[in-house]
Image (cartoon, helix red, strand yellow):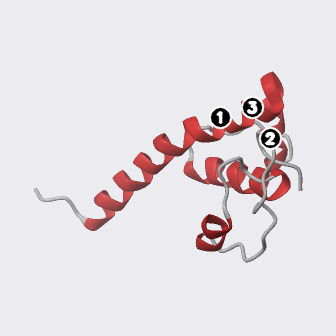
Amino acid sequence: MAKTNRDRVGEALELLTRGLLPFVEREMRAVHGDKWETVARQSFGGKKVNRSDLHTVLTVMWDQSVEHGLQECTRARRSESGERTTRCSQPVGAYGEL
């Protein structure tokens, strides 16, 4: 049987999660060291979260990029993701000083 569009979208979202997770973990470790998971949980009120869930990965990535400015963040990338400010246009260090 042929794949449905729902199946294709589901697979794409799973690939996105698998691709983003190592990036988010690396950036969080660079700033927070061994306490990065505790910091990540703050986005969810300190509750334990499922790291393989796309919502979790995107929420942590967004919260930390707004708070600290991702190392690789540029004005164009923030603009593409819907953020219209320049908070991360001049990052310094792992997440940058805003």
Q: Is residue 74 above or below residue 35?
A: below
Hey, which residue is sitting farthest left in the picture? 1
What is the crowding at mark 3: few (fewer than 14 residues within 10 Å), some, or many (at least 20)? some
* Picture coordinates of residue 7, whole percent (x, y): 30, 58
Q: Residues within 10 Å of mark 2 (few under 14, many from 20)?
A: few
Q: Secondary structure at mark 1?
A: helix
On the image, which quarter does residue 53 sit in? top right
Residue placed under numbered mark 2 in the picture:
93
Q: Which residue is mark 1?
A: 25
Element marked by disc 2:
loop
Q: Which residue is mark 3?
A: 30
The CA span between labels 3 and 1 is 9 Å
Q: Earlier in the sequence, mark 3 or mark 2?
A: 3
Q: Secondary structure at mark 3?
A: helix
Above or below — where is 28 with respect to 20? above
Q: Which residue is drawn at the image coordinates 75% and 54% (left, top)?
A: 65
